[in-house]
Image (cartoon, rainbow, N blue to C red):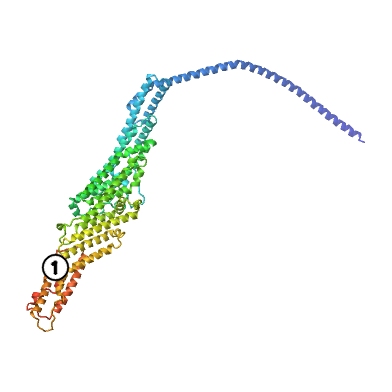
Amino acid sequence: MIPTEDASSRKREIEDKLKQEQETLSFIRENLEKSDQLTNGMVSILSSFESRLMQLENSIIPVHKQTENLQRLQENVDKTLSCMDHVISYYHVAKDTDRIIREGPTGRLDEYLACIAKIQRAVEYFQDNNPDSPELNTVKARFEKGKELLEAEFRSLLTRYSKPVPPILILDAISVDEELEVQEDVVLEHLPEAVLQDIICIAGWLVEYGRNQDFMTVYFQIRSSQLDRSIKGLKEHFRKNSASSGVLYSPAVQAKRKDTPTKKVPKRPGYDHDLRVRHITDALADKHGGSAGKDDVLDIEIDSYIHCISAFIKLAQSEYALLTEVIPEHHQKKTFDSLIQEALDNLMLEGDNIVSAARRAIMRHDYSAVLTIFPILRHLKMNKSDFDATLQGTAASTKNKLPTLITSMETIGAKALEEFADSIKNDPDKEYNMPKDGTVHELTSNAILFLQQLLDFHETAGAMLASQESSSSASSYTSEFNKRLLSTYICKVLGNLQLNLLSKSKVYEDSALSAIFLHNNYNYILKSLEKSELIQLVTVTQKRAESSYRELIEQQIQMYQRSWLKVTEHLADRNMPVFQPGAKLRDKERQVIKDKFKGFNDGLEELCKIQKGWAIPDKEQRDFIRQAQRRVVSDAYRSFLHRCANISFTKNPEKYHKYRPEEVEDMIEKLFDTSA
């Protein structure tokens, strides 16, 4: 059972809590009543605001629509005014551009092109909107005038600034200096950069807007003239400078003459070694009315033509690079074809003239003239690939010009070679033309020197001969095939020469002089072959050529030595009397000994007198023949004197014993020496 005090206390707590809860409830009710009042007030305000918005909307929307219409009308008015100004401006284009068009584009190309563009837009406007208006004709005329002046400016710029390339610069561009590991390309600047950009700009406009291709004709005509003038200038440079100073190359590369050891002369374009043609001999020049001066001129002409060919390739490549910047792509090849025609035709004409000159010389039997073709032909063939690459895309007639010239040169060259071989075989045996002293014949020296020229151009000469072959084996020429052909040809010339010399030797009445003549010529041929390395070409088809010539030389020495038999036969034991020591000789026996002495003395004197005027130019051979003959005669004479030493065959022994052995040897030692 709970005590009374605790229950009372508990009751009071409950009553206090109840009272607090009642107070809280009363507070909440009051707040709810205030919230309802505020809500009602807000609803009333919002309803009033909505009503007012509806009234405002009903008032503003008509005003907004009216304003929008007014703005649209304003824009239309502005656009109309702008269009009117734009249209009206077309009517003033002719007047506004008159001064600029009349003064032309010189010095203000950008402004001028902008002016032309304005005129072009006017033309398009009138064509689209009012094709019958007089203003259309006016602006059209102004446009055509502007285009005409642009074309004139194009021509003027090209004409004024296109200059021939200086010869020195061309020589720098085509020279090859073997001391430089990497060759520096010489840039050929044909036009100043600013001028070139103006030309490119005008050309672009004429193509895109001018609908005009006439400027391409103007371009190739002007540039063609400059290309031709550049090559002619190089040719003139050779004629002036080469003839006077001998300097064939540009000072810019500091080329030295051959007698200056400080620096090598730069090679000619694409050459393995100097191609300078060495002319046959002064005798050959005299034979055909030539001279050293003419040879020098010919050398210069050959050098000039060779350099002009290289210059054409280099300049044509440079012209094509320039052309690609100015001319539209689909017109480039045709324009380039036209551009190079004049210079190319002149080069080919000059080449044809060289062929014609060689042909005329061959008709005169001046076969040395064919040597002018060899360096040129080799240079043309060496540069043919570059030539073909440069002319790629041009007309077939243009590309075929060089092959045609090469074929002509090969044909005339092969003809000259064949006729030269025949001329060696058929050279007449003229007594007055034979050397009196039995030395080397002019025909031999000329033939050998001619063949030595072929050594410098052995590949060209071999290909030249191969070009005339019609056999199936010649269908695909090889270097080895060409070499064998040339070897066969050289052997043919040498064979013809040998036959002719043998025939000529019969002109001499003295068989000993005939032998000396053949000996000298055979020896000259052999030494020349060995010295010039022609022997290596000969042995390609004739393995025993060298030994064959040595055998021929030995045969002629033996033939010559037989001439001394009529001297030494008097010293032989034949008919020599047999006697006892101290016995007295009969008159007949004494006369035999006298006759032997007299025969020897007379024969010795006669031979020495005759043969002293003969010649053996080769000192080694001359000494060998002298020594051999001196030994034979001296030994026989000493033996004869020894047998006759104790024989009394005359009261005047000095009359018969005229010469001591040493004197005989001295006499023989003076053989073949006209100065003795």
Against 554, is 395 above or below? above
Task: Quadrant for residue 215, please give it.
Answer: top left
SS at mark 1? helix
Left or right: residue 78 compared with residue 485: right
Task: Quadrant for residue 606, please give it.
Answer: bottom left
Q: Amino acid at mark 1?
A: Cys
Against 60, is 181 above or below? below
Image coordinates of residue 114 in percent, x first then y, are 39, 28
Residue situated in front as seen by the camera: 161 or 625: 625
Q: Quadrant of the N terminus?
A: top right
Q: Residues within 10 Å of mark 1 (few under 14, many from 20)?
A: some
Residue that label 1 marks: 608
Residue situated in front as seen by the camera: 529 or 48: 529
Residue situated in front as seen by the camera: 516 or 4: 516
Give the residue furthest to the right.
1
Q: Is residue 185 visible?
A: no
Task: Quadrant for residue 438, please give it.
Answer: bottom left
Q: Is residue 385 visible?
A: yes
How many badges with numbers are in the image?
1
Left or right: residue 661 compared with residue 274: left
Image coordinates of residue 490 in percent, x first then y, are 27, 57
Left or right: residue 49 compared with residue 403: right
Against 385, is 656 above or below? below
